[in-house]
Image (cartoon, helix red, strand yellow):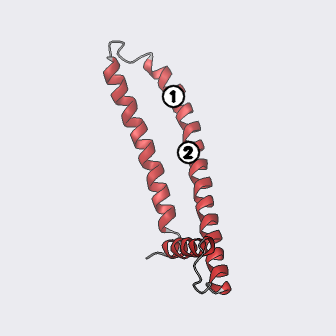
Amino acid sequence: MTKAQETILFLARFNFWRRSNDNAAAPSPTEVGAAIDDAVNLLLRYDEMERVRYGLEDSLTRSQQDADQQCRLKETFINKWETSEQKVDRLQKRDDAMKAAIDQFCDAARKEQP
């Protein structure tokens, strides 16, 4: 079980105990505090990954906009008889490649987490 899973499980059990009318022994305040600290640290790392991901997506969007401008210029010289289906396939491949790059970056960021 990962640290995140352990923290989630502990906090879920603690919250259930806190809301129930059960007379079971209360968890140790030290354990509760440690679990809260772990949750905060996990959320901070998640937030950092999200900011990196969105920053990368913004960069890719700007790059895509620049590339789109260049493509529009080139497309004036491309065969004008290209079908709509061929255009959709070409654009879909480009979008899939960009999504794959974002996923690879996010996977690498997750692997670097302690």
In this rendering, the label closer to the viewer, 2 or 1 = 2
Q: Amino acid at mark 2?
A: Glu
Q: In front here: 96 or 72?
A: 96
The x, y position of residue 56, in whole percent, is 57, 48
Which residue is denoted by mark 1 in the rendering? 68
Q: In front here: 13 or 72?
A: 13
Q: Which mark is residue 31?
A: none
Q: Quadrant of residue 74?
A: top left
Q: Along the polypeptide, which appears first: circle 2 or circle 1?
A: 2
> In the picture provided, is 14 more to the left or to the right than 93?
right
Quadrant of the drawing holding the N terminus: bottom left
Q: Residue at x 41, y 36 (%)?
A: 94
The x, y position of residue 108, in whole percent, is 47, 62
The x, y position of residue 103, in whole percent, is 45, 52
Most extreme residue toward the top is: 81
Residue 57, above or below 110: above
Q: In front here: 67 or 86?
A: 86
Q: Secondary structure at mark 2?
A: helix
Q: Residue at x 36, y 26 (%)?
A: 88
